Amino acid sequence: MTESAKAAPRRRHAQANRRRILDVARETLSADPETTVDDIARAAGIARRTLYGHFADREDLVNALAVEAVESLRQAFVEERNPAEPADLALARYILAVWGIGDRFRMLIALGRRDPDGDIRGALTSVRDLAGELLAQGQRDGVFTDHLPAPVLAHVMESVVVSMLESVNDETWEGSAPAAATAVLLAVGRTRPEAEAVLRHLRTGGSRP
């Protein structure tokens, strides 16, 4: 067997270990931001040496989780975005998608609570910029409120989503994707009947009211 053939199974095993470490770390850190590297290694069923073979330290691991979380949010935005679609429909569609990957977003929130001076919020800049572009489009079309500049409104929207996810974390609100999308649409200037019409359209795929 050639060296390259021997290396392939080792690479697959290493990739599987890295994936397991990240998945377990996301789950344990979401539940307890004080979780240590030793705790994560134990929960993943691997030796500390194996974990440190993939991540130099806890900060390196956290950074990898943040990159994955932000990329999942950015990808959801890109995949759900249809430039021909009205801005309020596009925004609601995005929030519904984000809620479906809320476990990764909640992990960021948990880590941000532990280190309020860190750059977890800063890591969301790329996603916030995409949301700002959509909000600006909605303002130009007269769909969203324009009493705030689009970048500021993007911060407002983010705060609303974060607050709802924190409430789910704290078990003070059960939450649901439609309720989250409705709250965001209200925050950016849609009325409740308008928000409900948007969600009804997304459920049925019917013609725009």
Image (cartoon, grey):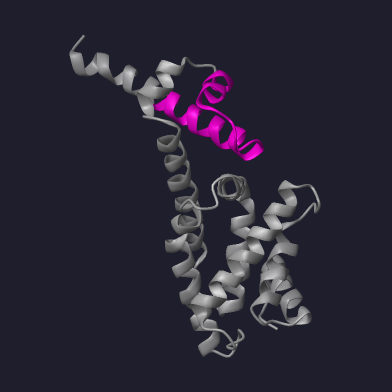
Residue sitting at the far left: 2
Quadrant assignment, res 114? top right
Residue drawn where x is 66% and y is 66% of the image: 160
Identify the image quadrant of the N terminus. top left
159 w.r.t. 72: above or below: below
Residue drawn where x is 40% and y is 16% of the image: 49
**79 or 110: which is nearer to us?**
110
Q: Is residue 201 left or right of residue 64?
A: right
Q: How many marks?
A: 0
Q: Is residue 31 left or right of residue 119?
A: right
109 w.r.t. 131: above or below: above
Q: Is residue 29 magenta?
A: yes
Q: Is residue 101 left or right of residue 201?
A: left
6 w.r.t. 107: above or below: above
In this picture, which residue range is highlighted in magenta?
15-44
77 w.r.t. 69: above or below: below
Residue sitting at the far front: 117
Q: Position of residue 166 (x, y in %)?
A: 69, 53
Q: Position of residue 187 (x, y in %)?
A: 67, 75
Residue drawn where x is 66% and y is 37% of the image: 31
Quadrant assignment, res 153? bottom right
Q: Position of residue 104 (x, y in %)?
A: 57, 46
Q: Is residue 70 left or right of residue 13?
A: right
Q: Is residue 206 magenta?
A: no
Q: Main secondary structure of the magenta part?
A: helix
Q: Position of residue 40 (x, y in %)?
A: 54, 25
Identify the image quadrant of the C terminus. bottom right
Residue drawn where x is 80% and y is 54% of the image: 173
